[in-house]
Amino acid sequence: MSLVATGLVKHYPVRGSDSVVHALDDVSLELAPGETLGIVGESGCGKSTLAKVLVRLEEPTSGTVVLDGVDLTALSGAELRRQRRRIQMVFQDPYSSLNPRKSVGSALEEVLIVHGFGSSAAERRSRVRELLELVGLSPTFAARLPHELSGGQRQRVGIARALAVEPSVLILDEPVSALDVSVRAEVMNLLSGLQKTLGLSFIFISHDVSMVRQISDRVAVMYLGRIVELGGWKPVLDEPLHPYTEGLRASVPVPDPTVHQAIQATVRGEVPNPVNPPAGCRFHPRCPAAVDACLTVMPQLTEVHPQHEVACHVAVAEGHLPLRAITS
Ligand SMILES: Nc1ncnc2c1ncn2[C@@H]1O[C@H](COP(=O)(O)OP(=O)(O)O)[C@@H](O)[C@H]1O
Ligand SMILES: [Mg+2]
């Protein structure tokens, strides 16, 4: 498995105007086999947009997503369906994507039918039992309706549904954020176990630094549609180079990811409107370290330490890189 996203841009039109929401601006990333890349950032920074573009639930404005040499962004129709099977998404709230009148078993069977798995009803039913067991649910859950399940059980069904089509990559968008704190650890453990036994690669998205820290090999920090820092989880989260990462890890996330979290403790002000993002570094109006260049020159991700990249003029300058890297 190799997943390479290059230059992903997603601009949503704003109704009744010529402006666009800069949900995603020039995001590139790579995912290695068996790896977990964590994506962290405040609400509204473009995490879910990135997830949807990666699985092609949303068409990117530009950029490419290449999975094992196949450019998913260039596909359509049957070929897209065939390839898309290999990269599946788990949503924050599986309830909203489960038909309330359909049993868990028939929902899973339907996925198998749509993707041509299992040649007979008996075979599909046995696969459903297997999938339920894989996510730690007894086969009797096949007969249950979504409203009869707890949040944790529902998320297990959401994971089973993603696994039904035997993907190699899971995009997990805030998979435990809606769950009670008491069941979060169980679902996190389930995910780690599945990753090992099935050899899956994960993109794990959360607004909560502590969740990302738990599961990630590498971490990408997003701010207003861009990756501002990227590297191993430990250097990024314990010795961050970007002032935003520093503020984010010092913040206490609120349980509801739709509410802007309070990073104001260390970083002043609110996240600016993505319809009209600031010039230069998008973080400069809130940055305690901003210098003149930050107001006009957009910083690019630059490797300051081996495999630790940051998009920050100040951090790059302090890393003793040539000035060329700062202004080009
Ligand atoms: N379908 C859409 N139409 C217009 N704007 C959108 C749409 N989806 C998301 N956005 C905007 O794009 C930005 C990024 O949203 P999102 O990707 O959901 O962020 P996150 O998941 O990090 O909270 C936000 O400003 C959001 O309001
Ligand atoms: Mg989101």
Image: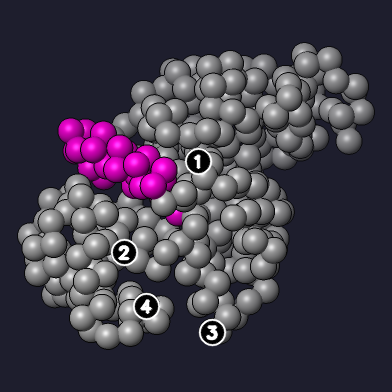
Which residue position holds label 1? 36
| Secondary structure of residue under mark 2 | helix
Answer left or right for 300 relative to 50.
right
Look at label 3 and name its amino acid: Ala
Q: Which portion, as a residue range, is magenta?
A: 170-197
**Disc 1 beta carbon < 8 A from ligand 2?**
no
Residue 181, which numbered label? Answer: none
Q: Which mark is residue 117?
A: 4
Asked if residue 34 shows in the view, the reply is: yes
Specify the amino acid type for callout 1.
Thr
Between 243 and 229, the one lying in front of the other is 229
Q: In terms of image quadrants, where is residue 287?
A: top right
Q: Earlier in the sequence, mark 1 or mark 3?
A: 1
Q: Are marks 1 and 3 in contact (CB under 8 Å)?
A: no
Q: Earlier in the sequence, mark 1 or mark 2?
A: 1
Q: Earlier in the sequence, mark 4 or mark 3?
A: 3
Quadrant of res 323? top right
Q: CA distance from mark 4 to mark 2?
A: 13 Å
Q: Which circle marks residue 161 in the picture?
A: 2
Does 196 lie within the magenta span? yes
Q: Is residue 74 magenta?
A: no
In three-dimensional space, the C-alpha distance between marks 1 and 2, rounded to whole angstroms, equals: 20 Å
Q: Badge 3 is on which residue? A: 78
> Split into 4 quadrants, where in the image is the N terminus?
bottom right
* Closer-to-camera residue (187/302): 187
How far is disc 1 from disc 3 in space, using C-alphas?
29 Å
